Image: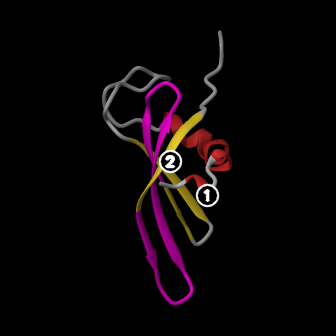
Amino acid sequence: MTTYQPLVKSVVLSTQTKNNDSELVQLIVTLQDATQLRLIRGDGIKSITRLLSIPCPICRKDFYCKCFDRFVEEIDGQVEEKDWK
């Protein structure tokens, strides 16, 4: 059994909100296998949700699942601010 390894292909800035001393950023991340995710960063919190454009490549479900929760740090580590378009 092979394990899933997400590889970030592109990143698009969706929204960026700045308050007094906090910032919330939402990014649309496209992986090498065409899976699209919404990565949310703010105040040290990171979360990820899969956009429902194709079934989940891990569990093959066609609805919201939590499969990518375990890859938040790995995917976030591949996202550089200079890559945002």
Mark 1 is on which residue type? Lys
Q: In which quarter of the image is residue 82?
A: bottom right
Name, please, the residue furthest toward the top.
Answer: 1
Q: Residues in magenta? A: 15-39
Q: Split into 4 quadrants, where in the image is the N terminus?
A: top right
Tell me which numbered mark, 2 or 1, is placed earlier along the sequence. Answer: 2
Whether residue 13 is in magenta: the answer is no
From this view, report whether residue 11 is shown above or below residue 62: below
- Mark 1 closeness class: few <14, some 14–19, many ≥20 residues within 10 Å: few
Mark 2 is on which residue type? Val
Q: Which mark is residue 11?
A: 2
Whether residue 38 is in magenta: the answer is yes
Mark closer to the observer (2, 1): 1
Q: Which residue is drawn at 47% across and 85% down?
A: 19
Residue 66 image offset from top left, x and y in percent? 47, 38
Residue 47 image offset from top left, x and y in percent? 52, 54
Q: How far apart are marks 2 and 1 (CA)?
A: 10 Å
Tell whether label 1 touches label 2 (CB within 8 Å). Answer: no
Q: Residue at x 54, y 42 (%)?
A: 69
Q: Which mark is residue 82?
A: 1
Q: Is residue 38 left or right of residue 6?
A: left
- Mark 2 closeness class: few <14, some 14–19, many ≥20 residues within 10 Å: many
